[in-house]
Image: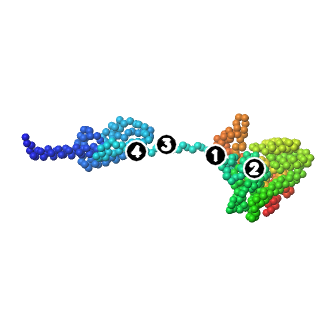
Amino acid sequence: MTVPIEEKNESNQSGKSEKRQKQLEARISTAVGIEKTPEKLKDLKAEKLTGAEAKKRAKAEKAAKRAQVKQEQQIPLQGVTKVSALGDDTAQAGKSSATEPLPSSISIGQHRRTGSSSTNAQKPLQLRPSQQQTQAPPPEPKNEVKKVALFSHLYGHPRRTTIAGAVKDVHPSILALGLQMSNYVICGSNARCVSTLLGFKRVIDAYSTPPGTSLTRHLTLHLSTQIDFLVSCRPLSVSMGNAIRWLKLTISHIDPDTPESKAKSELCTAIDNFIRERVTVAGQAIASSASSKIQDGDVILTFAKSSIVERTLAEAYRQGKRFRVIIIDSHPLFEGRNLARALAKLGIPIRYALTHSLSHVIQDATKVFLGAHAMMSNGRLYSRIGTALVAMMAKEADIPVIVLCESIKFTDKVALDSIAINEIAPPEELGITSAVTSKEETTDRWRDNPNFQPLNLMYDLTPEEYIHMVITEYGSLPPSSVPVVHRLSTNT
């Protein structure tokens, strides 16, 4: 049976059109990312999308998928919903997908490319770690030093108690000296001054001038390194400052042509002469002059411990005078205990009391002898804290107050109160120990109390109207003559 040519052409055309329709359906299904199920094909046939409409729909689906991926990147790390394919089955797949913990990297489905054989290929997408993982632990709170606002200008670096961090150029004798001063092993203005000069003498003995420099210039810089370490252990006293200025002036006067060995020998000899003249001989002269003020039957009241007062009392006792001594002491150093122990060994009758009993024991005193840390240019006495209280009580009781002070402790500074110029000791020294609590435990309790501010001042200032006389190696003089003696002692 023969088929007409027209029917054969029509069948060929219909076959070609069906083939084109199947290819179009395949492209649409691949671009949109859906399976070639009969239901989908029926929907596509019913919609009868053109090429432009299918392309537009694919573009919209692609944008929706990007938005969904971006949203899933912002979810917390505890768990995420698996990404499902876009299309009509999105809602159904979203219901069936379970929430799983998120690993370090999340695999996000990529868009299928048209004509690609691997339509399910996925590429992992790294997410940034959560803020909980990158956040550093909070710093531990530090124990800040509690400062009293009125004395805030006096707080400096904490007092050095070890040699850790010291400069390598510091001499071993200076290292030991600084720690002894910091721990009050060497205490007192005269003792600190003499120990410093003897330490500098050892430094000079071990010093050698580097090549290309002169002793006059480099030795001064080398001594400055030693001085910086001493200051870090404890502030310099007035007598130490005067001695250091004298030593630097002496070094500057050395002839550059002088051999190094001879220059060092001359400096060591000059240091020995300075100690002998300005401290030892001056103390003997003051003790001899002040002991003449003591009469038989006197009751001498003194505060804390002063080396020149101790020498004066010992000198008067060796002269055969019979008198009694009242020693007033205070917390936390209790320096008066050493003075009481030394005088008791000599056989001098001693009464030891603290500052809270001053108003009672001062009624028996006939004279008050006080030591000095420094004498200011305006005639005021700068000494261990508590001295001003003793002088004021003596003034009220009409008891003469006599200050014993070497001229090396005189200064051209003017002080009106003990706020501008003073020294603050570590507050740990104020801790009270007992059988139950140690000093460290007491200090920790004070630090934990936000309403407590410890203040441990070292010195106070006594007005000149409370002082009856100042005895120096130049003789007895009123407080107003202090600047004159200071100019004479410095030859200016």
> Within 10 angstroms of label 4, few (less than 14), some, or many (20 or more) residues?
few
- At 86% from the left and 53% from the top, the residue drawn is 284
Q: Are discs 2 and 1 less than 8 Å apart at CB?
A: no
Which SS class for mark 2? strand
Q: Determine whether, in the image, residue 457 is placed left or right of residue 94.
A: right
| Residue 459: mark in rendering | 2
Task: Work out how far the residue at label 2 is from the one at label 1, CA to CA, in angstroms.
Answer: 24 Å
Q: Are discs 1 and 4 less than 8 Å apart at CB?
A: no
- At 15% from the left and 46% from the top, the residue drawn is 13
Q: What's the amino acid at mark 1?
A: Glu
| Residue 133: mark in rendering | 3
Q: Are discs 2 and 3 less than 8 Å apart at CB?
A: no
- Among numbered discs 4 and 2, the one appearing first in the sequence: 4
Q: Quadrant of residue 120?
A: top left
Q: Quadrant of residue 140?
A: top right
Task: Work out how far the residue at label 3 is from the one at label 1, CA to CA, in angstroms.
Answer: 30 Å
Task: Work out how far the residue at label 1 is from the one at label 4, CA to CA, in angstroms.
Answer: 48 Å
